[in-house]
């Protein structure tokens, strides 16, 4: 599900016709049978995208954590003794 679910995706020709659309005849939206259903779909879509973003961020952090090299004990001891 997309975050722009309520907005219809116009074609190139429809977009070109909007230049001359003075009265908003070409404004189209995806309808839902009720306001509650539209709200539920929007909330579901928002939380799903949020979850995907969090999962992606966690994968990046885990990848960075696995590839990070631990500090060398000898070099840290030498810098401490100086």
Image: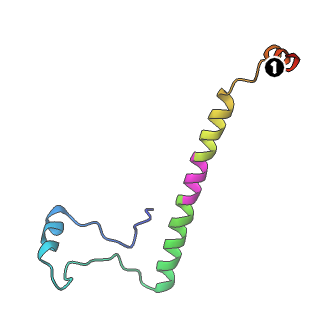
Q: Position of residue 33 (x, y in %)?
A: 42, 84
- Give the residue pinned by disc 1: 76
Q: Residue furthest front?
A: 82
Indicate whether 38 appears above or below 48.
below
Indicate whether 78 appears above or below 3.
above
Indicate whether 41 appears above or below 68.
below
Task: Name the residue at 15% across, 83% down.
Answer: 22
Looking at the picture, the colour scheme in use is rainbow
Task: Name the residue at 55% across, 53% down.
Answer: 52
Indicate whether 51 appears above or below 5.
above
The stretch drawn in magenta includes residue 25: no
Q: Position of residue 24 (x, y in %)?
A: 21, 82
Kindly report the secondary structure that dominates the magenta region of the rendered protein.
helix
- Tell me where residue 5 sits by quadrant: bottom left
Task: Name the residue at 59% across, 57% down.
Answer: 51
Tell me which segment is drawn in magenta.
50-56
The stretch drawn in magenta includes residue 55: yes
- In the rendered structure, the answer to whether residue 11 lies left or right of residue 54 reads left
Q: What is the count of numbered marks? A: 1
Front residue of 54/20: it is 20
Front residue of 68/52: it is 68
For the C terminus, the image quarter is: top right
Q: Residues within 10 Å of mark 1 (few under 14, many from 20)?
A: few
């Amino acid at each position: 599900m997309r975050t722009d679910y309520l907005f219809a995706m116009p074609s190139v020709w429809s977009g070109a016709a909007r230049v001359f659309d003075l009265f908003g005849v070409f404004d189209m939206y995806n309808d839902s049978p009720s306001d509650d259903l539209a709200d539920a779909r929007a909330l579901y879509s928002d939380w799903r995208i949020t979850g995907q973003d969090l999962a992606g961020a966690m994968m990046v952090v885990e990848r960075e954590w696995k590839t990070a090299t631990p500090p060398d004990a000898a070099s840290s001891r030498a810098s401490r003794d100086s």
